[in-house]
Image: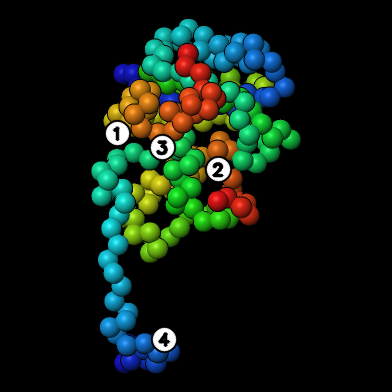
Amino acid sequence: MQKQYETVFIITPLLTQDQMKEVAGKYRGYLSSQGAEIVHEENWGLRKLAYPIKKKSTGFYHLIEFKADPSIITRFELEFRRDEQILRYLTVAEDNNMIEYNAKRAKGEVGNKGKLEKAGQIEQL
Amino acid sequence: MAQAYKNIFINITPDEQVEEKKECWFRKNNIKYIDYKDADFLITFLNEQGQIYPRRLTGTSVKYQRKLAQAVKRARHLAILPFVTDSLK
């Protein structure tokens, strides 16, 4: 039984754009290798953090929505914990209301995606 | 007896105690899910220091107050909102 999940993680600001994309791609690759299906992906670019984490005041935000078997999530989060380039991560299991909302958000109908796009901060992948 | 005692201290008539019934914003607008990624929206339910307003001020129903609190806590974890600050607005 596959469930839909949403993961947001913050990559250290010490990397270049290309290196940051490489790191994000690594996690996308990991999910794909475990048989997960990527539903939606966003990169919010370099954003200011609300408070410093590991003495960094900015970070690259990356969002991945995917359908996967619940058993792979523990291993997936372990990868984040081992990676020093990841400042924070959060994985949320989606319920029906959230799936509906996120589908609308991906189209830019609700939420802050439209605003981020206007500010040139967001990159659809 | 207890009621009369209380009114002496508060020193207002019972009529003034009856407050206007507030309506839950989420029920009114038929919103089922509160997005933790949208900081600008969540800020409307926070005070200057980043604390969540109580239900008795906003009129939010129990169900959505819980969902709101969870969304704010997720946003804080991801540094989208601060845990504590002096000038949020």
Query: Disc 3 and disc 4: Cα gap in Å?
Result: 40 Å
- Residue placed at 30% from the left, 62% from the top? B22
To which chain does the residue with label 3 belong? B
Q: Which is nearer the eye, B55 or B29?
A: B29
Q: Is residue B56 above or below residue A103?
A: below
Q: Quick one: label 3 or label 4, which is nearer the N terminus? A: 4
Number of other residues with Cα within 10 Å of mark 3, as a class: few under 14, some 14 to 19, many 20 or more: many
Q: CA distance from mark 1 to mark 2?
A: 23 Å
Q: Residue A1 at what x, y percent from top left?
A: 31, 18
Amino acid marked by disc 3: Asp
Helix, strand or loop at label 1? It is helix
Kindly identify which residue carries mark 3. Answer: B35
Badge 3 vs badge 1, beta-carbon distance below 8 Å: no
Measuring 29% from the left and 33% from the top, which residue is drawn there?
A97
Q: How many other residues sit within 10 Å of disc 4, few (<14), some (14-19) or many (≥20)?
A: few
* Cα–Cα span, label 1 and label 4: 45 Å
CA distance separating discs 3 and 2? 13 Å
Q: Which mark is residue A97?
A: 1
Of labels 2 and 4, earlier in sequence is 4
Disc sitting over residue B74 in the figure: none
Does residue A74 appear anywhere in the picture? Answer: no
What residue lies at 41% left-to-right and 18% top-to-bottom?
A40
- Give the residue at mark 4: B10
Callout 2 and callout 4 share a chain: yes
Q: Amino acid at mark 2?
A: Leu
Which tag, 3 or 2, sits closer to the chain's start?
A: 3
Specify the subunit that label 2 lies on.
B
- Residues under labels 3 and 1: Cα distance? 11 Å
| Rendered residue at 58%/19% (across/down) | A79
- In the picture of the structure, the residue carrying the numbered disc 2 is B81
